[in-house]
Image (cartoon, rainbow, N blue to C red):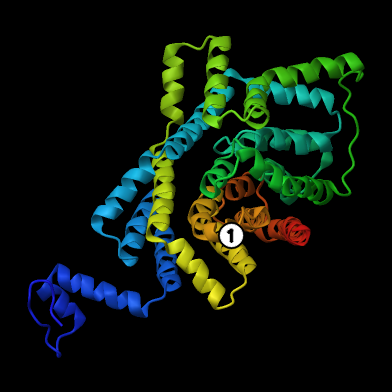
Amino acid sequence: MKNKIGTSPSKNKSPLAFFFESGLGGFEFIESQKNRIMPDSVKIVIILIGILVFIRFKVALSVTLLCSAAALGLLFNLSLSKIALSFFNGALDPETLLLTASLLLILFFSAVMKETGNMTRSIAALREIFRDARATVAIIPAIIGILPIMGGAMLSAPLVLEASDELRLSPEKRTFNNYWFRHIWEYTLPTYPSIIMIATIVGIPVAQVSLINLPLTIAAIAVGFFFGLKGVRSSLPSSGPLTFGTVAKNLGRFITNLLPFFIVLWLTLYFKVQLAYSLALAVIGTILYHRLSSTLIWRLLKISFSWEIVFLIWGIMIFKEILVVSGAMNSVAKEFTAIGMPPFILIIALPAILGVITGYSNAYVGLSFPILLPLFQAGAPNYGYVMMAYCSGFCAVLLSPMHACLVMTREYFKADISKLYRLLILPVAIVFVTGVAFLLISAWVK
């Protein structure tokens, strides 16, 4: 056997020595040997282990994804030119650019809503409608959770503390209610980056993702009220009679102050307008209505803009592009099928592992969904699998000690961590079982 430069390798030389002596020819020889002895599923496992190691050492997720994409291309024997082209196509694909614009606009939109006081006024109006402190304790973090405001759990925590004074809740119950109701919309609302990512990666409409995840939000609301407010009594505060006029007035204030957000939902879900365009219209309208100065707009842009978000999206889409170009998705799916591994084990285990390690929904969606894509797209989009993968990962995120909201609110309310987990585990388990039930129902209907 001869390599490309015409020399014959010695029988006594190791592959590593042969590589250094033979240059590119030796590299190709080693790669061909790897391809013969290493199943594609093992290559994916190697990539995942590398991702976990990077996460363990707190390497930025964007860097982790970009490095993983390059390593994936090499393991699947793509040429350097094909890897470079995949990086270029993944970063500049129109879907990638729209996704990046949507996420940056969401951050800016949240900053504008906070600056104008719309969010604060809407909550004040809501408290005048619901005189029962139990409802207010649940609704305040739920309202904050409508928009993916960074540190939103801490924004609602002081309001929950004030609203729950008369209820005499334990620190753990206060933490649970603030934390749980803050996240009930993250399964469905299209302003959350993870929902947009799912739609982009799987190739289905955002509205469809919201619809298939709706049972999870319903289950989360139900168990939140049951476990968070069970046995808690409340009396009406003496702030004047609750008349139809009072309710109508405050309901009007509530809707008016959140009107830009409702417009985004209306355009995106009903008229199927691309989210980036809906957000742009809502942001422009809000700025013009409040007559924000150019200086303030520039300050909010600087505060809300995140290069990490840009590189994170690039990393996700480039990683997906490499998976497609290399054929890794199809070959790995075939290998898993050949060894008889049930698909539902993969769609549950992989997002859950990444979710508990990162404590970040964007991370487990971005890292696991491209790998699970062949299972989602087997024949036709398997919506049950998509919903279950998201459910499994998000349940893990809710229990993750890496979840910033959990850590911050626990510290704010001075809750005991072991008691808090005892409150969380059963509600999370019920949401998970809801996902399993709807997965089985969807499979039965088919």
Report the front residue among 220 and 423: 220
Amino acid on which the number 1 mark rests in the picture: Ala
Report the front residue among 346 and 142: 346
Identify whether 260 is placed above or below 367: above
Q: Position of residue 387 (x, y in %)?
A: 66, 53
Viewport quadrant of the N terminus: bottom left
Identify whether 248 is placed above or below 177: above
Q: Position of residue 153 (x, y in %)?
A: 62, 40
Q: Position of residue 421 (x, y in %)?
A: 69, 59
Q: Using the rendered image of the protein, determine whether residue 72 is visible from the camera's viewpoint.
A: yes
Identify whether 250 is placed above or below 342: above
Q: Looking at this view, name the residue that lies furthest to the front.
A: 379
Give the residue at mark 1: 378
Relative placement, left or right, of 113 versus 178 is left
Where, by quadrant of the figure, is residue 133 drawn?
top right
Report the front residue among 183 and 155: 183
Relative placement, left or right, of 211 versus 45 is right
Report the front residue among 310 and 27: 27
Disc 1 element: loop
- Number of on-image labels: 1
Which residue occupies 22% across, 75% down? 29
Which residue occupies 67% across, 20% down? 259
Viewport quadrant of the C terminus: bottom right
Q: Using the rendered image of the protein, determine whether residue 52 is visible from the camera's viewpoint.
A: no
